[in-house]
Amino acid sequence: MQETNLYTITVPPMMKALGALSKILDKAAAYAESKKTPKRTFEEALLNDRLIFDQFSLLMQIQRVSDNAKNGIARIAGIEAPKMEDAEKTVAELQARIEKTLAFLKTIKPEQLIGREEAKVSLPYWNGKSLTGFEYATEYLMPNFYFHLVTAYSILRKNGVDVGKDDYIGGLPLKD
Amino acid sequence: MQETNLYTITVPPMMKALGALSKILDKAAAYAESKKTPKRTFEEALLNDRLIFDQFSLLMQIQRVSDNAKNGIARIAGIEAPKMEDAEKTVAELQARIEKTLAFLKTIKPEQLIGREEAKVSLPYWNGKSLTGFEYATEYLMPNFYFHLVTAYSILRKNGVDVGKDDYIGGLPLKD
């Protein structure tokens, strides 16, 4: 029996999306590698590209996907998230960050999130104001998580990496 | 008391996002108007722009946001969604479509979605296969809804319309 609760609407979709992002990043690395010349490689250029000049780079979009996942879930649960230094410079380092983010999400037990609808969630730049756990999850966390995921996808798509909607969705458990 | 269920995680976030999209579209129309010359207007050009040449245009992205909202919710509820002809050509017509989509969502009662986790949901191109209502909502509907919303936003942002993350999020019910 599937249940709709603050755990099932956040952690599993985020874990699935992080897995999809990891596969997309593998395609990105292979694509950058295929374009290299004897004198130049392009992975760094791809990771530093942006959709729009004053938005975050691909590398930063992926860091924000990770932040939304680990920090957002930790905030609802009322626990500390693992700190990450934003020091990644390569696809391999971003993959390691995705792994660490997934490892943290795997430690979260449903009961740490279930029933946290009325928990107070605050961010440093909200000047002491707060949302409820439910508002935070549905009006802030998931929309922001998908925002950075879609933007990362679009940066790769724009640069010619062979990714499509199926890569973004990451497969579906279709059954007869 | 806020409850997490198949209604609260879909209809209210979609209604909020459609409201935000409507305001963003007003900014887009004003921006296109500000660029017009005695001989040319640019609203149509903006609506036909794409982030990437083989993706949907802005106009089509907004139609897909509407489709995801009305068709997706109808599928989970097991009812018919209002048909829309995809005949929009102007911002005013897209605004009317958003209004009609919102009007449909307003007719949905929570009890039409609550408890539909195990309902069978199928799409024409799934060859008779299906997802459960819960899987459909969390693994397909909401990720796709945000995909088209973020892409619409990015097309406008790329063209210089003055929109930021706050416009995308559409305000937060912050409290002391």
Image (cartoon, coloured by chain):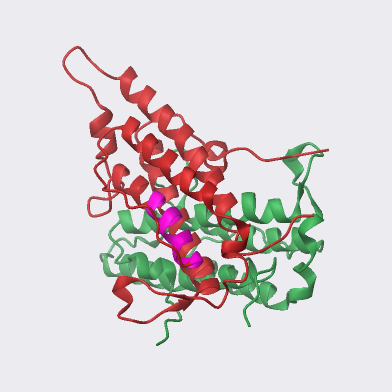
Chain colours: A red, B green
Residue B55 drawn at (x, y percent): 48, 42
**Left or right: A16, with B82 as reference point:** left
Asked if residue A43 is positioned above or below residue A10 in the image, the reply reads: above
Residue A114 drawn at (x, y percent): 62, 66
Asked if residue A42 is positioned above or below residue B113 in the image, the reply reads: above
Quadrant where the N terminus of chain B sits is bottom right
> Who's the residue at 26% across and 65% down the image?
B35
In-front residue for pair A112/B79? A112
Tell me the quarter of the picture where residue B77 sits. Answer: bottom right
> Who's the residue at 66% across and 76% down the image?
B103
Residue B63 drawn at (x, y percent): 57, 58
Residue B143 drawn at (x, y percent): 56, 52
Asked if residue B119 is positioned above or below residue A47 in the image, the reply reads: below
Q: Is residue B108 magenta?
A: no
Q: Outermost residue toward the top?
A: A38
Quadrant where the C terminus of chain B sits is bottom left
In-front residue for pair A12/B141? A12
Q: Outermost residue toward the left?
A: A39
In-front residue for pair B73/B80? B73
> Who's the residue at 33% across and 77% down the image?
A126
Tell me the quarter of the picture where residue A71 sits. Answer: bottom left
Q: Is residue A74 magenta?
A: yes
Q: Which residues are magenta?
A: A65-77
Asked if residue A56 is positioned above or below residue A158 in the image, the reply reads: below
Q: Main secondary structure of the magenta part?
A: helix
Q: How many marks?
A: 0
Tell me the quarter of the picture where residue A115 sits. Answer: bottom right
**Left or right: B27, with A165 as reference point:** left
> Looking at the image, can residue A143 be seen?
no
> Looking at the image, can residue B26 be seen?
yes
